[in-house]
Image (spheres, grey):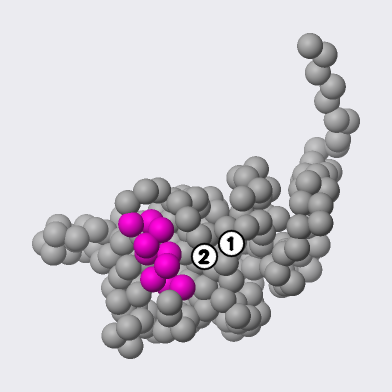
Amino acid sequence: MKVELENVKPMEIEARSFEIITEELGDKKLVPGTELIVKRCIHTSADFDYADNLCFSERAVEKAIEALKEGACIVTDTQMAKAGINKKVLERFGGEVFCFMSDEDVARMAKENGTTRATVSMDKAASLDRKLIFAIGNAPTALVRLYELIQDKKLSPELIIGVPVGFVNVVQSKELIMQTDVPYIVARGRKGGSNIAACICNALLYMIDETRGKA
């Protein structure tokens, strides 16, 4: 079988990828203002299901961008997501990225309480005196704890990105977040991951970064 490769220059690969995504989406209607986020999730995963799975609360994107411009920080539940977020762009607005999963006090408290590190990490994040965006791509227990903290009036995030991947309590934890009054971007169902969490953060950052926001 003859294989024909596209003749694309290295610096043009990303742009060509987005052209293909747009072509394959065809007449698919995306929520106005969310197109870049959806397309970047598809670009990251090669999974067009995100055109249907991603759910946005009313004005979630606008509120998140406003918070980022005001120096909001991002809290993740994995070092992988933290590594994938464009910290240079975030720092330009005064924000930073936190992941407490490897902290010794988090590990100790999780063991003492018989709970997960993700749960304890959310408690630690709640003590930060900063505007916070949560990007959860792995641990449904993090979303459950965020829901509890919100219900108890102990936390009011600027945005929750709820995209854990898996089978146990993943679907249910996402539905809990969608029942709150907090702005959210949720990948409904089982799909997601740390790469998707980071991807959504970057898409939001690129929407206010003129050098990258046209992808």
Q: Residue 186 shows which numbered tag?
A: 2
Amino acid type, callout 2: Val
| Magenta residues (range) | 169-178
Side of 31 where 114 appears, left or right: left
Disc 1 crowd rating (10 Å Cα; few below 14, some 14-19, many 20+) is many
Whether residue 102 is visible? yes
In this rendered view, identify the residue nearer to me: 33 or 49: 49
* Figure quadrant of residue 202: bottom right
Q: Residue 54 shows which numbered tag?
A: 1
In this rendered view, identify the residue nearer to me: 117 or 163: 163
Residue drawn at (35%, 73%) of the image: 146
Side of 109 where 91 appears, left or right: right
> In the orientation shown, which residue stands out farthest toward the right?
7
Whether residue 212 is visible? no
Question: Looking at the magenta stretch, what is its main secondary structure?
Answer: helix
Side of 86 where 35 appears, left or right: right
